[in-house]
Image (cartoon, grey):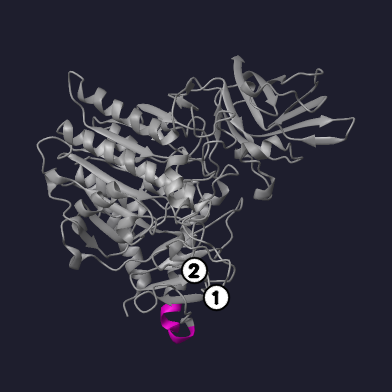
Amino acid sequence: MKNLLALACACVLACACAAIGPVASTAAAEKPNVILLITDDQGYGDLGCHGNRMIRTPNLDQLYRESVRFTDFHVDPTCSPTRAALMTGRYSTRTGIWHTVMGRSILFRDEVTLADAFAANGYRNAIFGKWHLGDNYPARPQDRGFHHVLIHGGGGIGQTPDYWGNDYFDDHYQVNGQWQPFEGYCTDVFFRQATQFIAQVRNQDQVQPFFVYLTTNVPHGPYLVPDRYQQYYLDRGVPQPMAAFYGMLENFDENVGRLLASLKETGQDQNTIVMFMTDNGTAAGMVRPAGKGKTKPDAADATVPPWPGFNAGMRGAKGSEYDGGHRVPLFIRWPARGIGGGRDVTQLAAHFDVLPTLVELCGLPVTPPNPLDGRSLVPLLEGQDAEWPERTLFVHTQREEIPPKWTRSAAMTQRWRYVNGAELYDMQADPGQATNVADRHPEVVAELRAAYETWWQGLEPSFSRYGYIGIGSEQENPVHFTCMDWHAPTVQQIPWDQSQIKRMPEVNGWWMLDVARAGKYAITLRHKPAEANFPLQADQAQVKLGPCEAKAAVASGATSVTLALDLPAGPARLDTLLTEESTAKSRGAFYVEIKYIQP
């Protein structure tokens, strides 16, 4: 057996060199447009074309028939890490993102994104839907290469950073940094706005190629969708929330159909690269019974519903280190280049391969400042499967302030999965990962352990760094941020959803800020955002930002309290405390506004 560690290291070096060297010219006379479609929490088995006989996804099934399909394509087991790797071409932990909250879903300032690469080469870029790599400068999409931004807040509609009261219907979304109201269901809005953006770019006097990152909130929970989409599944015995989950995907599929039809009607379909993928394994597309390793309910179990879901024979779901948590679809279609035709690629690939692939396909002369982990998939798209080298890739699920080693992890090769530093699975003989064969193949275990150790050493420098929230900059002033980005000893202390805020938990944490310029700042504390008009449950307020502190009394019935501090420039920790003396209850400010006032 070849030495996997040597191959893994050689792969990383080759990827980095290829990305900064000459790139292939495009086959088309003009640079192609790019549309990258991503759903949130849809698994590999949540598609009709992958064998799910219940769900209705005719437009994605058609795209499947017209695309090159990657059947062993992997992402991270949760959403923010996947999006970080996708945008940077690097393992997400290197970029500062290994969690979905706790300040560990904020992209490091020195990372360059796929949108940056497109912007530097004349593309007009837009994002519609979910970002989840930072809600504040310098990590917002408008700071990272996007010219037009229409997004919800945080990691999902209704989460703490989102507009108060958003519920998927007739919501407010941020348009280039400002909240605006929209009519309609969230997915319909995102697709409608994306279609309008494409038309505007096309109608400009000087036509630009475009990059559209259309990344919906669906089918992430809460599972809200118009009744007509879920009733079909309820009538056929699909249990909730799976019926609503499927309904959300059926609505998404309808929107995909309209978008692709619009491209064809306007003659843009031939020279537009369309990519579809998802961000982790399924969240609600299968019944999850008790019992380690089970992928389907026991047939003798009387509680089994008529339709238990479909997970394409995989073990695990969203968040899992087993393949069901991170093996997802990837479809790529570009008719003008001859990429398509309904061909499967079985070689191991991953999310961080998307950036170098698009750089090569679109002929972008880009020199990334940080070494890439991904490699271009163009040889596989062109049918050169036999020349693809062996790779060793890694995934892990981290829910801590500092990632612990070997936690919910997998080292992967084409044949093997080494899970949690203890289990080995032969994917050729056992794709459902039912039988641990670690004791039968000690040489494979040793090589994968060594590869993991080297990989982990490369991640460790990130653990002592922070994705800072910038205050006092000209790009964003005032700055609004929330407790979703608190650092805290445990994730249980983070109220990341508005439903949790409504319960007014007695919890606290701290933020890591970067003060852009020294001067006087006004710091406003709230339990709920200004639009909620909610009285503070406190009579005393305190802030500490770096070496500076201030205290103030809270007026009866006030919805906020503002304190002033003279701050030096540089990184600093922010702590807040709101205390109700009569009940001895205290908690941190869930919502904070900081405004630079004067030097």
Question: Is residue 336 among the parts visible in the rendering?
Answer: yes
Question: Is residue 84 among the parts visible in the rendering?
Answer: no
Numbered circle sitting on residue 300: 1
Cα distance in 3D space between marks 1 and 2 = 12 Å
* Amino acid residing under circle 2: Lys
Residue under the point 33% across and 70% down = 414
The answer to which image quadrant residue 591 occupies is top right
Relative to the observer, which residue lies in front, 417 or 60? 60
| Apparent side of residue 158 relative to residue 491 in the rendered image (left or right) | left
Residue 443 inside the magenta-drawn segment = yes
Relative to the observer, which residue lies in front, 389 or 148? 148
Q: Report which residue position mark 2 lands on.
A: 296
Outermost residue on the front side: it is 235
Q: Which residues are magenta?
A: 439-445
Residue 260 percent location from the top left of the image: 24, 39
Front position among marks 1 and 2:
1
Residue under the point 67% across and 28% down = 528
**Main SS, magenta residues:** helix
Local crowd at mark 1 within 10 Å, few (<14), some, or many (≥20)? few
